[in-house]
Image: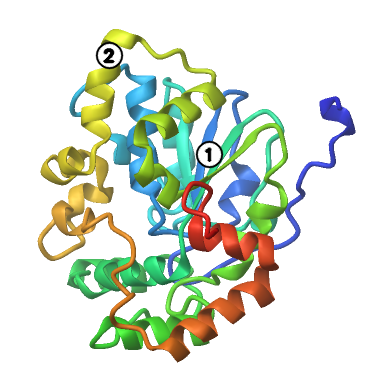
Amino acid sequence: MTSSEIEWPVKTREFHDHHTDSTIWNDFKFRDDDIIISTYAKSGTTWTQQIVSQLLFDGAAGVPAAEMSPWVDMRIPPKEVKLPELEKQTHRRFLKTHLPVDAIVFSPKAKYIYIARDGRDVAWSFYNHHANANEAYYDAVNNSPGRVGPPFERPADNAVDYFRGWLENDGHPYWPFWVNIRTWWEIRDLPNVLLLHFADMKADMPGAIRKIAEFLEIPIKEDKWPAILEHCSFEYMKANAEPTVPLNGALWDGGAQTFIHKGTNGRWKDMLTEEDNRRYEAKAIEELGPECAEWLAYGNQGRKP
């Protein structure tokens, strides 16, 4: 099937909240080799940005991946500031979004990497992210130009209550979860889309890096391979967090190492009740269908027998 015969995704709506302004995509000028890294959030975004930066820059140490790979649809800085800065970039651009497919402009020539993670792990990671945000974070978000919705407030006192509110209100206090997963799953067979799962990346990081390199058509210099692996490891990223974290971690208590928290799954298993898990799993099937719900829970390598 040729490119002209493919039914490419079309933007059908705008999405606004305290963090997000989807209208920036309307004015964004794509280049044919652009790389878009997409997640719901807390699903391996920063890790994947680090992997792509290491592939693009041959395993160099200290690559400022967060600065080079901004969150395009975040309100801060406003698009009048952000778009000219993106236009100035001379390297192969690798950008980040947390929007569903129907709220972005989709380029048939760009490459899209989407990473998913079990929603319970997402909520647990979001709780750490949200609970450790400092006053500068709240000031920036709540005073962002054109903010939509109520002020962004501090979270519940514990991760279990946080998860229950997140599930009951579809991603609250951040953005809707299920539509994000569903819309990217629906376009998984497009030739310029690669779907990955956080659990699979954890199980085989070298294999995931090589898969990403092949998808992006980036030849790996084998003499640089050990450095790439080292710089993409959780241990290295935790110890050298500032270049990989937005604003070098200035918006979180404890700095960048708080942002790069644990990188593990299953912290909810001994804390959620059977009823909590039943409700989550039933909702996943209702929203995604059984095939996508199973993939979201287990990935490929860890799929339930």
Q: Residue at x 23, y 75 (%)?
A: 131
- Residue 207 placement (x, y as % from top left): 42, 31
- The answer to whether 214 is drawn above or below residue 280 in the figure is above
- Which structural element holds mark 2? helix
Mark nearer the viewer, 1 or 2: 2
Q: Mark 1 or mark 2: which comes first in sequence?
A: 1
Above-or-below relation of 294 to 163: above
**Label 2, on which residue?**
224
Quadrant of the rendered image containing residue 267: bottom left
Q: What residue type is labelled 2?
A: Lys
Q: Position of residue 255 (x, y in %)?
A: 13, 56
Q: Distance between the residues labelled 1 and 2?
A: 24 Å
Q: Mark 1 points at which residue?
A: 36
**Residue 34: % across, % down:** 55, 29
Please name the residue shown 43% across and 20% down the image.
90
For the residue carrying disc 2, how many other residues have a C-alpha within 10 Å: few (<14), some (14-19), or many (20+)? some
The reply to whether residue 191 is visible in this rendering is: yes
Q: How is the image coloured?
A: rainbow
